[in-house]
Image: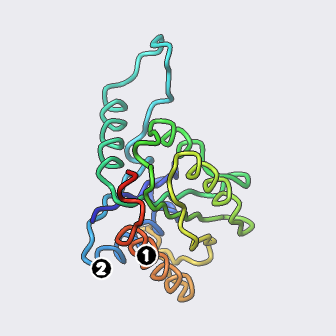
């Protein structure tokens, strides 16, 4: 089984990145393969159907790689910072590069981090998007706050809150269970 985590933060080394890395570690501990696509490190161009705006080759390569990884994934996790009560623009842009074909009947996990007021609103918005892409948003979600992390000497963050570590393990168990036991396999 193979998964894909899309990190929708424009900031390198963000709290959302730290949460994604924690989830990646939990998934790998279950002997499952997971790829991480970090939009801060691999940006995508804004969709332009007119063809009037030239795109940089690297953007096109990143978009093709994202599509390939999403096609191959048995489950997808979307991670976003809380930007003004919703998900990030770069995550929206990434989702615009994908289609129902990449999401159809796949379990999708939703996680976010807030720097200010803790809010799961971005995840509520993403549930609607996942549903419109024919994906299956799993019930358990994770909405952390900056205070749930500690910063290491090298400047990177790690998820340090025990309750969120437990929730992350439950989240991973749930998304893997949905992927392994999907009654919708014949509909993909």
The part of the image, by quadrant, that contains residue 105 is bottom left
Mark 1 sits on what residue? 172
| Direction from residue 7 to residue 125 in the image, left or right | right
**Mark number displayed over residue 94:** none
Of residue 77 and residue 175, the one placed in the foreground of this image is: 175
Of residue 74 and residue 56, the one placed in the foreground of this image is: 74
Tell which circle, 1 or 2, labels the residue nearer the N-terminal end. Answer: 2
Q: How crowded is mark 2: few (under 14 residues within 10 Å), some or many (20 or more)?
A: few
Mark 2 sits on what residue? 30
| Direction from residue 169 to residue 117 in the image, left or right | right
Circle 2 — which element? loop
Q: How is the image coloured?
A: rainbow
In contact (CB < 8 Å): disc 1 and disc 2:
yes
Q: Position of residue 157 (x, y in %)?
A: 47, 71
Q: Position of residue 89 (x, y in %)?
A: 59, 42
Q: Residues within 10 Å of mark 1 (few under 14, many from 20)?
A: many
Vertically, is 56 above or below 25? Answer: above
Quote the CA–CA distance across marks 1 and 2. 9 Å
Say which residue appears at 36% left-offset and 77% top-offset. Answer: 26
Say which residue appears at 55% left-offset and 52% top-offset. Answer: 130
| Direction from residue 20 to residue 84 in the image, left or right | right
- Outermost residue to the top: 52
Say which residue appears at 37% left-offset and 32% top-offset. Answer: 59
Quadrant position of the N terminus in the picture: bottom left
Of residue 160 and residue 110, the one placed in the foreground of this image is: 110
| Direction from residue 130 to residue 115 in the image, left or right | right
Vertically, is 94 above or below 168? Answer: above
């Amino acid at each position: 089984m193979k998964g894909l985590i899309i990190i929708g933060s424009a900031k390198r080394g963000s709290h959302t990145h730290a949460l994604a890395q924690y989830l990646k570690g939990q998934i790998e501990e279950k002997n499952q393969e997971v790829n991480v696509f970090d939009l801060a490190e691999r940006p995508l161009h804004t969709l332009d159907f007119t063809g009037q705006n030239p795109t940089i080759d690297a953007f096109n390569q990143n978009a093709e790689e994202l599509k390939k990884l999403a096609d191959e994934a048995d489950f997808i996790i979307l991670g976003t910072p809380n930007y003004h009560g919703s998900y990030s623009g770069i995550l929206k842009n990434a989702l615009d590069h994908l289609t129902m074909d990449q999401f159809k009947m796949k379990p999708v996990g939703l996680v976010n981090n807030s720097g200010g007021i803790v809010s799961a609103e971005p995840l509520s918005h993403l549930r609607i998007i996942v549903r419109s892409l024919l994906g299956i948003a799993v019930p358990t979600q994770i909405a952390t706050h900056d205070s749930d992390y500690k910063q290491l000497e090298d400047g990177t963050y790690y998820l340090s809150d025990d309750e969120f570590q437990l929730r992350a393990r439950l989240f991973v168990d749930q998304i893997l269970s949905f992927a392994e036991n999907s009654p919708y396999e014949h509909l993909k």
